[in-house]
Image: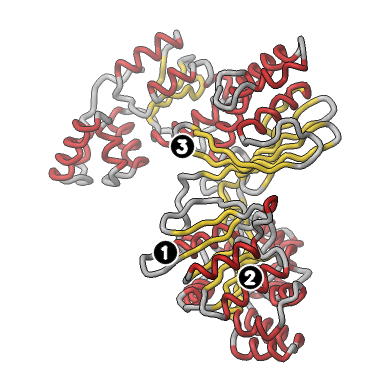
Amino acid sequence: MKPTRRIRIGEMLLEAGLLSAEQLEHALDEQRRSGRRLGRVLVDSGLIDELLLARMLAEQLGLRFVDLRTEPIDRRVAQRLPEQRARRHRALVLGESADGALRIGMADPTDLQGYDELARVLNSALEPNGVAESHLLAALDRVYQGADDLTDIARELKADLAPDASMLSQIAGRASDDSTPVARLLSGVFEDAVRARASDIHFEPESSRLTVRFRVDGALRTHTRFDAEIASALALRLKLISNLDISERRMPQDGRFEVSVRGTPVDMRISIMPSHWGESVVVRLLDAARNLLSIDAMGMPPHVERQVRHAIERPNGMVVVTGPTGSGKTTTLYGLLDELRNESRKLVTVEDPIEYRLKGVTQIQVHERIALTFARVLRSVLRHDPDVVMVGEMRDSETAEIGVRAAMTGHLVLSTLHTNSAIGTPARLADMGVPSYMLASSLQLVIAQRLVRRLCEMCRKPAAPTPQELAWLDSVIGAEHAARLTPRAAPGCPHCGQTGYHGRAAAYESLELSRALTDALARGDDEGFLVGAREQLAGRTLAHDAVRLVRDGITDLDEAMRVSALTAEDD
């Protein structure tokens, strides 16, 4: 069924009262200037909701509207339309209708010329459906993800390796040469990782294969597998573009490089480690274009946000963010730095590595190999008259003591530490050799955090808790409150890749060093400190905040219980 008429989108929105004549005129001017479609101009300028526009357009044309976030899509059927054509015409084959026609989603179903071209290429009758453009582009990424293409490139690379393995360095090519099979293979893996929102890529050599896994929303998933023979070429290429020693295969190496994925710069941190079957490689993706999270956008409970703002408004003292690796500590620190940035303050960071570049901040990279340690850099930093100092991580007693002294002498110090809970932080610093009286004079606030996976908003629904989950809820918030809680779960859908999760959120607890707590620290009264800290955190622990996220439908009980288990030992 071919669309029989064009719809004048501007007039349609005017008649519906969703757009004023003045707004339409401005949008038409922008359309003429930029060459973009009017609908895209209206959506990008925030004048109309994209989903509403797509629904209205389908209704006016008498077409069915399809929400691609929940619509199941058969990749084999969808791939009947070549990717280049699908992206050019903003179209996706959704399946077959009862009469044998191909159902096809179109971002612009008024494009009659595009419809005719698609019918010719597919050699079939078409049944057009309306879809939202951004949802279509995301679906195209899922349908045409490059696992199959990568396998073909891997075979080409293996064929190059077969005649003479001694030519490995030539096969890896020059760092600037992107045309070799190994360079194209890695480029495809990087692009797939960005599409999947992966934070890490794992290249894991085994006896007969090389497994590539992505970490998405904190969980590892297998992306593809290659023959083991190409593992050395991939590792060599990664060393080459990271400026690492390509001849060293017995010692671990760390490096960094930058790639452009679909026009977006992405910083890559690489760690290479020798294993039994070859070199194991982990690449961490750092999106250089990603916006920093503000304190408002971090999702802190109100009492934590109040304590954080109060602490960073002080001219001196120490704020410590604590949690295990991968709990979002660095993201929180950068958010605090962003809040503090202005022309009246000098901000200096000491990091290993520098993850995100901040304008107006002096950022210093630690280099352990040349003895440029955290402690050594920190001593020099304090002679540069900073107002705020961020220490990426307090790894040793010398760094911790210098940081504490800086907080005592008029500087605001932000840092991270590996402990399981806020209560355990002063004891950890004391174990590192920082005297209790210095902690009492400098430590202002400890923020402990964990990341939980967000439930997919498209498929989440109410779910009855299991007996085990109900027992856990009883232990945290009591039976009466647990009985009134309606948790949710998500079975999985196309939008979340059938995982049930999409993105992550943080659970927090914060311990403010009150007069009573600092007095206990100064006296070395560990028991008194623990009693006072537990009283302050009563009903405000990480487990309680995880329950808040469950109550708000952000995560499920399984994730909340996992967070609670991570802090049980310290609590």
Q: Alpha-carbon neighbours of circle 3 within 10 Å: few (<14), some, or many (≥20)?
A: few
Q: Quadrant of the C terminus?
A: bottom right
* Image height of 481 relative to 157, above or below: below
Residue 379 spot, x, y in % from top left: 60, 68
Q: Residue at x 79, y 40 (%)?
A: 251
The residue closer to the viewer here, 191 or 162, is 162
Q: Amino acid type of disc 1?
A: Arg
Q: CA distance from mark 3 to mark 2?
A: 38 Å
Q: Secondary structure at mark 2?
A: helix
36 with respect to 245 (left or right):
left
2 vs 53: above or below: above
Where residue 327 sits, quadrant-wise, is bottom right
State the colouring used for the structure image.
secondary structure
Residue 504, percent from left and from top: 58, 53
According to the picture, the residue beneath numbered tag 2 turns out to be: 544
Earlier residue among tags 1 and 2: 1
Q: How far separated are the C-alphas under marks 3 and 1?
A: 25 Å
Q: Secondary structure at mark 1?
A: loop
Residue at (17% x, 41% y) in the render = 26
- Left/right placement of residue 2 relative to residue 552 reads left
Q: Which labelled disc corresponds to residue 522?
A: none
Indicate which disc residue 264 carries: 3
- For the residues marked 1 and 2, what is the alpha-carbon distance in whole angstroms? 32 Å
Question: 2 or 89: nearer the eye?
Answer: 89
- For mark 1, what is the residue? 341
